[in-house]
Amino acid sequence: MNPIKYATDFEKSVLIDNFVKRGWSKCSPEDNWNFYWACVSNVYKIYNIDSGYRLNDDQIINHFPNHYELTRKDLMLKNIKRYRKDLEKDGSLYAEKDITGKYLYLDFIPTTFTLPSDYNLFVEEFRKTPTSPWIMKPASRSQGDGIFLINSLSQLKKWSRDGNYTMLNNHTANKETYVISRYIGNPLLIGGKKFDLRLYVLVTSFKPLNCYIYKLGFCRFCTVKYNAGINELDNMFVHLTNVSIQKQGAEYNAAHGGKWTINNLRLYLEGTKGKEVADKLFDDINWLIVHSLKAVQNVIHNDKHCFECYGYDVIIDNDLKPWLIEINASPSLSATTYSDRILKLSLINDVINIVVPFNEMPDVKREKSTTKESLGNFVLLYDEKRSIRIHSSNTSSKETPSKNLKRAVWK
């Protein structure tokens, strides 16, 4: 039997070591590969209607054609807003609101606007709480690049005058689309420092939705203690948890990389807040992940040749409420510490075991089957074939909708 032929755009050891361990044969992306771990730009080329490229039944690739509907910050926002409105029109229980007008189950993204198109709407919202900080992010960049905080309209106008936008308030052409979100100013702190969660979610199909969550996610800590003061708005070592930023700081510890395992976080929360509170938090996180995927279910081009390993970034506030910050299409596979390398080596191993079951030649016509052992550290989060539809408007249950979501085992 001929070995599986792999191609990759990333010479990362956590990838290559996994391919070699399986006895796979390396080839070029231009060759007749069976498994391709591609960068997003090459995925665009493959699925460009002008390319004429057609994948064979024995080929699988690590991105869906238009994955950016979920991973571009402006498109994620647009799709989640549309999803909520659609559920409201359907009279779904999942679109219920409280007396203040907030969603009971779908309030998991901060108030956010796209600039320049939503500039006037942003100004209207800003003036309700004129001293609150907001965070600006380029819609299509990653690793904290181009992010900054503001707490006045004059700061935004100055930034616009400096050449970043042209006539921001008149909605004319801009150099780059940005999103601006209400800053989570009350983050849960541990040791006085802000942190977020990096969670890995594997999607093997959008129609029907089939997704898994990785138990070995981690927390990323800032190197400097949190300070909400106006004088610290420009200090990214206080506000941004991205490792690419924090490792440049004088306080960065290369031994542990400013990271904590999800397991440690859970033990900490159970010890300080109680098990019931910790359980609810992690159920809420599972909940927001599934809803974010459902939000793009009807716009993602579901292709049997594709899978996706997303990197979810979630912040927890001091009320133990999780907020979805962004979703990464190509979460970093670089290892900053030894434990980081072991984690990512294991992550890729478990991804491959699910999308290439039993190390057999890929065949998109064959029904994929996995054993409990082959899941490794992944846990089935949602299987639409077997689960109650999350946004069914016909449910007659008196329980809260979250009871319908399969609870992932994080321990």
Image (spheres, rainbow, N blue to C red):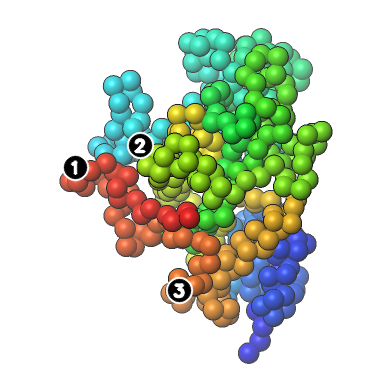
Q: Does residue 399 sit above or below 51 in this rendering? A: above
Circle 1: residue type: Lys
The residue carrying pointer 2 sits among few (fewer than 14), some (14 to 19) or many (20 or more) residues within 10 Å by Cα, namely some
Precedes in sequence: disc 1 or disc 2: 2
Image coords of residue 137 (percent x, y)? 64, 30
Q: Answer yes or no: do the residues labelled 2 and 3 have beta carbons within 8 Å?
A: no
- Residue nearest the observer in this picture, 233 or 34: 233
Precedes in sequence: disc 2 or disc 3: 2
Q: Nearer the viewer, mark 2 or mark 3?
A: 3
Outermost residue, bottom side: 1
> Is 336 on the left or on the right of 22, as rendered?
right
> Is 163 on the left or on the right of 103, as rendered?
right
- Separation (CA) of disc 1 from disc 2: 15 Å
Q: Does dot 2 land on a helix, a strand or a loop?
A: loop
Circle 3: residue type: Thr
The residue wearing badge 2 is: 105
The residue wearing badge 3 is: 371
The residue carrying pointer 1 sits among few (fewer than 14), some (14 to 19) or many (20 or more) residues within 10 Å by Cα, namely few
The residue carrying pointer 3 sits among few (fewer than 14), some (14 to 19) or many (20 or more) residues within 10 Å by Cα, namely few
> Is 303 on the left or on the right of 283, as rendered?
right
- Separation (CA) of disc 3 from disc 1: 34 Å
Q: Does dot 1 land on a helix, a strand or a loop?
A: loop
Give the residue displayed 49% in from the left and 15% down from the top.
Answer: 125
- Residue nearest the observer in this picture, 317 or 352: 317
- Residue nearest the observer in this picture, 181 or 216: 216
Give the residue displayed 73% in from the left and 70% down from the top.
Answer: 17
Q: Does dot 3 land on a helix, a strand or a loop?
A: loop
The residue wearing badge 1 is: 398
Give the residue displayed 49% in from the left and 72% down from the top.
Answer: 373
Precedes in sequence: disc 3 or disc 1: 3
